[in-house]
Image (cartoon, rainbow, N blue to C red):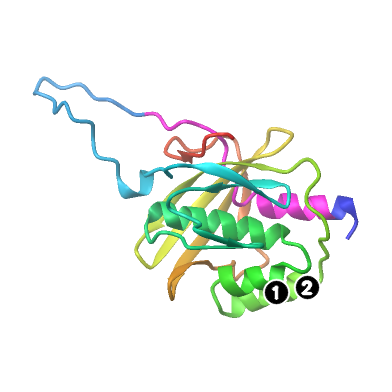
Amino acid sequence: MNRSHTTHFTAVVVTAFAVPMAAAGLLACTSDTPVDPQPPAITATSAVPTALRWQPFQGVNLPVAEQGPRHIDGAVATGFDRNPVGAALAAIHATVRMSIASDSQWPSVGARMLAPGPARDLWATTRAQISITAPIADGAPKLLGYRLSHYSGDAADIDVYSIHPDNSLTRNSTRVIWHVDDWRLRPPEDRTRSPVSAVDLPPADMVALPAR
């Protein structure tokens, strides 16, 4: 695959997981009744990654936190907490790694980070027809944050927001499921419908990932 084709492929797929950087605002309400001085409890789906740091993979910086991944073996990242933050981090890592892993790396990413089933098999068939031999040299999207629209201990729906070099924003709608002992990304079953869409602004309740 030549560089222009590689860059195009990467941009299309990576935008699904990146989130625009935006701080979620807190809405206060006034009342004549006494107010509890304690701040409101943070809901599970709005919890933020702790001890966040960034680690590069194939030219894209990925978030690593206390909630995961705990193990990075080449292109494969595993060991995510079974909670909303762990699910979101797993979705981000799996989406990016399956998209830009090199020709020698993607089989192990698919086997260990994607949920088994027809959707994974279809992804593997499609991926085998594309060649990626080098990291993204420039123009990589940047992850801004995520929003959980649904969470249970067994599955989570997560929108990942990214910003691109031209300042455009995208949303990647993903789903992860708890499989055996970790979160696994479930690729879209309908390959005619892209999970990536353009957005004007990130949602106010997005969990922002502070820039490196």
Instruction: Please give the range of residues in magenta.
Output: 6-25
Q: Which mark is residue 49?
A: none
Kindly give the residue lying farthest to the right in the view shown.
2
Look at the picture and state if 41 lies above or below 39.
below
Give the amino acid at mark 1.
Answer: Ala
- Tell me where residue 46 sits by quadrant: top left
Which disc is residue 124 wearing? 1
The residue nearer to you, when weighing 183 against 126, is 183
Instruction: Look at the picture and state if 53 lies above or below 135.
Output: above
Q: Is residue 154 left or right of residue 74?
A: left
Residue beneath disc 2: 128
> 192 or 187: which is nearer to us?
187
Badge 1: few (under 14), some or many (20 or more) residues near its Cα, within 10 Å? some
Is residue 12 one of those drawn in magenta? Answer: yes
* Amino acid at dot 2: Ala
Q: Position of residue 117 (x, y in %)?
A: 56, 79
Quadrant location of the C terminus in the rendered image: top right
Determine whether label 1 and label 2 are within 8 Å by CB.
yes
Residue at 49% x, 64% y: name it: 176
| Viewer can see residue 194 | no
- Residue 151 drawn at (x, y percent): 37, 58
> Does 121 appear above or below 74?
below
Look at 18% across and 30% down and name the residue there. Answer: 38
User: Is 132 within the magenta?
Assistant: no
Q: Position of residue 136 (x, y in %)?
A: 78, 48
